[in-house]
C-alpha cells in the first residue's frame, strides 16, 4: 500500500465516516465499517483515530467546515446583515438539507449520542462542539456583513446565532419527519423574515426605535 500523508489519511477516514453515518447512523458506524468504507485496514484507522469518539469529533468539525464554506458561497457581505441571513439560510437549506437529508439526520444522532454519554471522554463534548460551531458561524457572518455594510443590529451576534440555530433545528426535524418541500420553504422564508426583523439591521448612526 502506497504511503499516504497523515493529514490526507485523516480526511479519507472522515469522509468515509460521514458516508457511513449518513446511511447507517451512529450505531452502524463502527470503526470496522468505516475502515471498510475507506478501503483501509482497521489498524490504520485506529492509528489515526485511537477511539470512535475522536473520529466522531473530527466528523463534527469537518461538517461544520463544509457548512461554513457552503453558506459563504456567493454571499456579498457588503449587502448587509439581512442579505447574509437570507442567503446563508437559503443556501444551507437547498444544499445541505434538501439534497442531503441523511447528513442532517446524522448530526441529530450525533447530538443525542453526545447527550447520552455526557462526561464520557470526548463524546460528551460532541454536542457542545456542534452548537458552538454553528452559533459562532452565524455570529461571525453577521458581524462581517455588519462591518462591510456599515450596519449595527438591535441584538448581539451570539443571541442571533442561537435563535437561528433553534429555528433551523426545528424546521429540519419537521422536514425529516414529514417531508414537504413547498411547506418547508414557505416556513423557512417566514422564519428568516422574523429573525431579520428581530435583528433589525440599520446603518450605524441611524436612530434606534424606543
Image (tube, helix red, strand yellow):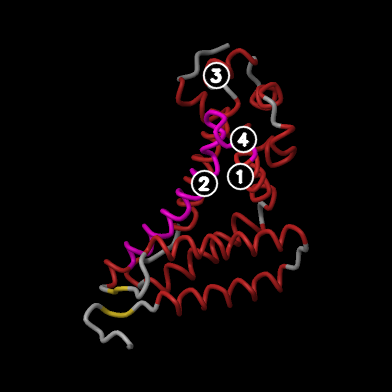
- CA distance separating discs 3 and 4: 18 Å
Left or right: 208 as drawn, with respect to 106: left
> Residue 53 sits in which quadrant?
top right
Asked if the residue at tag 4 contacts the one at tag 1, i.e. Cβ–Cβ closer than 8 Å, the answer is no
In the rendered image, which residue does mark 2 sit on?
130
Is mark 3 in CB contact (under 8 Å) with mark 4? no
Q: Secondary structure at mark 3?
A: loop
Distance from disc 3 to disc 2, alpha carbons, whole Å, reads 21 Å
Considering only order in the chain, which callout, 4 or 3, is on the residue closer to the N terminus? 3
- Quick check: marks 2 and 1 in contact, CB under 8 Å? yes
Image location of residue 200, percent across then percent down: 39, 79
| Pointer 4 residue | 117
State the predominant SS element of the stretch in magenta. helix
Query: Quarter-wise, where is residue 74 in the image?
Result: bottom left
Q: Taking 8 as reference, is 168 left or right?
A: right
The CA distance from mark 3 to mark 1 is 21 Å
Vertical placement of residue 137 versus 209, above or below: above
Mark 1 closeness class: few <14, some 14–19, many ≥20 residues within 10 Å? many
Residue at 62% in and 35% down: 117
- Residue 50's label in the rendered image is 3
Which segment is the magenta one?
A: 116-145
Alpha-carbon span between mark 2 and mark 4 = 15 Å
Amino acid at each position: 500500500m502506497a504511503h499516504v500523508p497523515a493529514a490526507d489519511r485523516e480526511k479519507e477516514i472522515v469522509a468515509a465516516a460521514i458516508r457511513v453515518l449518513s446511511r447507517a447512523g451512529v450505531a452502524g458506524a463502527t470503526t470496522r465499517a468505516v475502515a471498510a468504507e475507506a478501503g483501509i485496514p482497521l489498524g490504520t484507522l485506529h492509528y489515526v483515530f485511537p477511539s470512535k469518539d475522536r473520529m466522531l469529533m473530527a466528523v463534527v468539525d469537518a461538517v461544520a467546515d463544509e457548512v461554513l464554506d457552503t453558506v459563504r458561497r456567493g454571499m456579498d457581505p457588503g449587502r448587509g446583515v439581512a442579505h447574509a441571513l437570507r442567503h446563508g439560510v437559503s443556501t444551507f437549506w437547498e444544499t445541505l438539507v434538501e439534497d442531503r437529508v441523511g447528513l442532517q439526520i446524522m448530526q441529530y444522532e450525533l447530538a443525542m449520542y453526545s447527550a447520552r454519554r455526557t462526561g464520557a471522554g470526548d463524546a460528551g463534548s460532541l454536542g457542545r462542539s456542534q452548537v458552538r460551531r454553528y452559533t459562532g458561524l452565524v455570529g461571525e457572518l453577521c458581524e462581517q456583513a455588519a462591518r462591510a455594510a456599515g450596519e449595527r443590529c438591535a441584538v448581539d451576534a451570539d443571541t442571533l446565532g442561537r435563535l437561528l440555530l433553534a429555528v433551523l433545528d426545528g424546521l429540519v426535524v419537521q422536514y425529516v419527519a414529514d417531508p414537504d418541500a413547498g411547506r418547508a420553504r414557505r416556513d423557512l422564508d417566514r422564519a428568516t423574515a422574523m429573525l431579520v426583523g428581530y435583528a433589525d439591521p440599520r446603518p450605524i448612526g441611524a436612530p434606534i426605535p424606543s
